[in-house]
Amino acid sequence: MIRNVLSIAGSDPSGGAGIQADLKAFSARGVYGMAALTALTAQNTQGVSGVHLVLPAFVADQIRAVFADVRVDAVKIGMIANAEIAVAVADSLSAHQAIPIVLDPVMVAKGGAELLDHVAIEVLTRRLLPLATLITPNLPEAAALLASPVATTRAQMAEQGERLRAIGAKAVLVKGGHLAGPESPDVLVTAEGPVWFEAARIPTANTHGTGCTLSSALAAELAKGAPLSQAVANAKAYLAEAVAQADTLDVGSGHGPVQHFHALWRDQEGRQA
């Protein structure tokens, strides 16, 4: 049976992040993707130049319409943007906590634009974080949620993951892409303790949408029934190859997108792209 996964997130017209990246990742991981939009953005590979928020009541209407008609096997939450939308999403999902919910606390775009206001961080922490099966902050996002300095060591990453669990998260994947050095480790923190997932840092500027893609791949794996640790391993391996193949694309002049369909697309000579 093909699983159905709903993304609740913002739109990226350049296609590399947000809803567009989520739907690509869902398809690449073999699940049927659906989307409820929280915001429209004007952005490209060089940055975000404008944000238009969807009315919170209409965000809730979109979510309600999907659940009223379609079996939803997992949910991914991305860009929320303000406190009112965070409340609308939390209220809409409160009756659906039996399914996996992956929360990617999107706060800052790759180009530096703030995508989540400071009031919303408190609402996200209080209302959405306890609903999530897994949250996937990068180092600046984990620091913002905790009002702490950004972690610079593995020990600090694991410690911040434990602190996020203490304030309500069921499980936390702290992503170490911002750490200095040749490695890009992530740590999964659960009630059973920390588990590390190692990866070499891939030399490319084309990393637009990596957080969206990883969290969507995780939601897809959980929808298919993978245990949490295996879901992380599968999603991280998928993302690593998507980043490794990113330079096969020619999209924009800034931080280009990853290659979501690296296992499916072939070039004009018939070679795998």
Image (cartoon, rainbow, N blue to C red):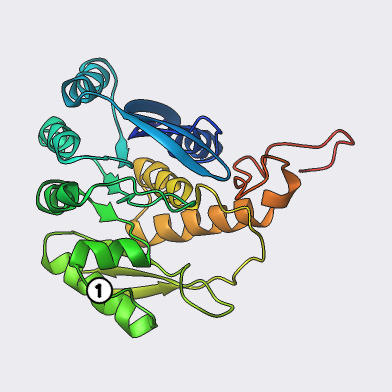
**Residue 15 in the image: above or below residue 111:** above
In the rendered view, does 168 fall on the left or right side of 203?
left
Quadrant, the C terminus: top right
Residue 31 in view in this figure: no
Which residue carries the number 1 mark? 160
Q: Position of residue 78 (x, y in %)?
A: 33, 42
Q: Position of residue 198 (x, y in %)?
A: 50, 73
Residue 18 in view in this figure: yes
Near-viewer residue (30 or 160): 160
Residue at the limit of the structure toward the front, as seen here = 49
Residue visible at 18% across and 24% down? 60
Indicate the quadrant where residue 151 lies: bottom left
Q: How many marks?
A: 1
**Residue 234 in the image: above or below residue 192:** above
Q: Tag 1, which secondary structure? A: helix
**Residue 45 in the image: above or below residue 57:** below
**Residue 189 in the image: above or below residue 244:** below
Q: Position of residue 217 (x, y in %)?
A: 45, 46
Residue visible at 37% across and 62% down? 138
Near-viewer residue (231 or 89): 89
Residue visible at 23% across and 51% down? 133
Q: Position of residue 164 (x, y in %)?
A: 19, 66
Kind of residue sitting beneath label 1: Gln
